[in-house]
Amino acid sequence: MTDQLSNPGRRRAMMTGGSLVALTGWSGLAGADGVRVDPAAKKTASGAKALPDYAQWKDADAMIVHSANTIEQKRSAFGASTITPSDRLYVRNNLNPPDASIVQDPDAWMLEVQGVGQPRSLSLAELKTLGLQSVTMVLQCSGNGRAWFPHGPSGTQWTVGAAGCVVFTGVPVKAVVQALGGVADGMVYMTGTGGEIIPEGLDPKTVMIERSVPLEALDNAILAWELNGEALPLAHGGPLRMVVPGYMGVNNVKYVKQLAFTKDQSPAKIQQTSYRFSPVGVKGTPEFPSLWEMPVNSWITHPFEPGQSAKAGRVQISGVALGGTHEVKQTEVSVDGGKTWLQASYIGPDMGPFAWRTFTLGVDLKPGKYQLVSRTTNAAGKVQPEHREENERGYNNNSWLDHGFELEVV
Ligand SMILES: Nc1nc2c(c(=O)[nH]1)N[C@H]1C(S)=C(S)[C@@H](COP(=O)(O)O)O[C@H]1N2
Ligand SMILES: [Mo]
């Protein structure tokens, strides 16, 4: 298959010649969206890597295993409901995850809290007594969409599947801070430390997962032990995770063992030089912006199958739209590569500013080739740009053009 997603360099050439043959309003053909699925596309690609042990429970058919620590959801596996099932949620580990024994007795997990009036350690059992809150939020790796950067940045070549919208439940960080006498004077960052075992002989700073976010993130942050209504699995940071709604994935520290309010950002490499937005050819340093807040983005997920064909007639084009730190306001869809746009409708419940919304647009398509793209605007007026902002590590790709694809209607 000549899939521009697996071969992004080709896509510019393919983004031409798509003509809008017919567009009409709603015609009431509910349920019949005419999508043809190529049976060959259902077979697992030969040479596909197996899921690692700690993620065996994932839906293998829905995932692309890049490596044991980088597992992406297939674009065709996004459903139309808001919540991403846990067994389809992407996985990204910068270090091997800790031993599964840490999730056997979650209540015994200890969290050290520093930079508050009365610093001390609390068990997860005690944290559970301090408050309870749920947040529906997009979890997305900053490298999602990296595959389209033409300079070939190092790192996993994610397309759209390093993202999901999930429900995290736990205690508001604010409640914990309040119970411990408030944030100590002069603290500027909230810093979480992951519970990975640092391989011997390495300088911990070069590998440890420790991330700092601005103190204002405290307002929405949660220490979570539940994902989509179930105990937080090891793959997603169980037994306890620091979640920072609206912020890029890396800031959501898994197996969090220390939460500290600090004057400075963490000295860890993952804070100082990785996850920095630097120009192409320039290494990340603390002068460049940190990957904190998530930008507005969207992509079409249906009809998307390898080979991308649909049957002529009415087609429901659907996808996901996220507003970053604000709710989404509108999503437009184009079937002619962005020459003309139509407003899509949001479907399903509005689950708050940090969740994504699924959208749909019904169109009547005659046989031909179409260039499908979507463009979202959030409540703060931020619009997805046509072109990605080039940067060394291929972060934050929210280009509507990059996220488009060709659909053949037969
Ligand atoms: N402790 C710890 N937390 C972590 C990471 C990690 O490697 N270790 N990876 C981060 C990155 S880069 C991302 S994108 C998300 C991935 O979350 P997920 O694996 O639950 O999808 O977790 C973040 N939190
Ligand atoms: Mo990430």
Image (spheres, helix red, strand yellow):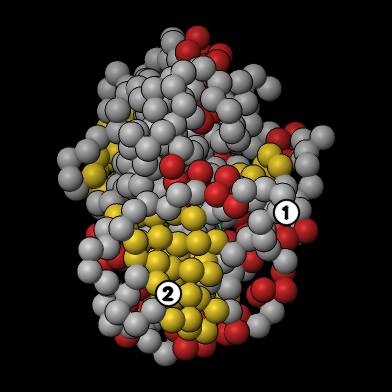
Residue with the mark numbered 1: 200
Is 218 in front, or is 288? 288
Counting labels gives 2
- The three-letter amino acid code for the residue at tag 2 is Val
Q: Residue at x 58, y 79 (%)?
A: 109
Identify the disc placed on residue 113.
Answer: 2
> Dot 2, crowdedness within 10 Å: few (<14), some or many (≥20)?
many
- The three-letter amino acid code for the residue at tag 1 is Glu
Is 291 in front, or is 62? 291
Q: Residue at x 34, y 33 (%)?
A: 288
Q: Image height check: is 70 above or below 152?
A: below
Dot 2 falls on a residue whose secondary structure is: strand
Marks 1, 2: nearer the viewer: 1
- In the image: residue 35, left or right of residue 325: right
Q: Residue at x 19, y 48 (%)?
A: 379
Is 81 in front, or is 284? 284
